[in-house]
Image (spheres, rainbow, N blue to C red):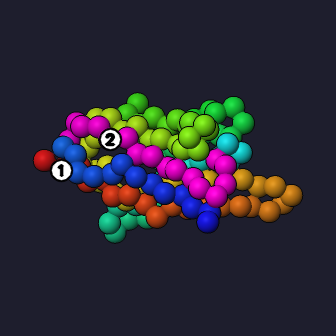
Amino acid sequence: QVQLVESGGGLVQPGGSLRLSCAASGFSLDTYTIGWFRQAPGKEREGIGCISSDDGETYQADSVKGRFTISRDNAKNTVYLQMNSLKPEDTAVYYCNAEKTEWGRRAVYWGQGTQVTVSS
């Protein structure tokens, strides 16, 4: 079964940290570009960062730059999102996706999301 599963979410106080995991089964993440997204209640889905499949270069949105870090462990078939200095506005459901294009056809997988709540 092809799946992406996010984990590591929960309730944290402002200024705290969480590490989210995106684990793949049924396929290998090493050939995919991995993106992290979030969606807060009443708002559209926001892209917050990605890590490339070729050189491992990462990008982060301005809203999280300097606080969030994306990394991958191909041996564990897992991508991580380290979140530090969390703010209440970071509260959202966080999703990962895996994407690649080959022979003109795009393949995309999405996880079901994990809830992150930042509140005192």
In the picture as drawn, the residue positioned furthest to the bottom comes out as 42
Task: Evaluate whether residue 99 shows in this view.
Answer: no
Determine whether the residue tagged by mark 2 lies in a helix, strand or loop. Answer: strand
Q: Is residue 11 above or below residue 64?
A: below
* Residue at 33%, 58% in the rendered image: 115
Q: CA distance from mark 1 to mark 2?
A: 13 Å
Name which quarter of the figure residue 113 lies in.
bottom left
For the point 34% across and 69% down, the residue is: 42
Q: Is residue 90 left or right of residue 55?
A: left
In front: label 1 or label 2: 2
Magenta span: 14-29
The residue indicated by pointer 1 is 119
Question: So how many labels did they put on this image?
Answer: 2
Which quadrant of the figure has residue 17?
top left
Q: Residue 20: image x %, image y %?
A: 40, 45
Residue 115 lies left or right of residue 25; in this view the side is left
Q: Amino acid at mark 1?
A: Ser
Q: Residue placed at 51% from the left, 61% from the top?
A: 111
Q: Residue furthest left?
A: 120
Kind of residue indicated by mark 2: Leu
Within 10 Å of the Cα at label 1, are there few (<14), some (14-19), or many (20+) other Cα atoms?
some
**Which residue in the structure is indicated by mark 2?**
18
Q: Is residue 84 magenta?
A: no
Q: For the residues labelled 1 and 2, say whether their Cβ atoms are less than 8 Å apart.
A: no
The percent position of residue 72, horizontal first and vertical second, equals 56, 37
x, y (%) of residue 46? 46, 56
Q: Which mark is residue 111?
A: none
Secondary element under disc 1, as helix, strand or loop, is loop
Q: Is residue 113 visible?
A: yes
Which of marks 2 and 1 precedes in the sequence?
A: 2
Q: Position of residue 108 (x, y in %)?
A: 65, 61
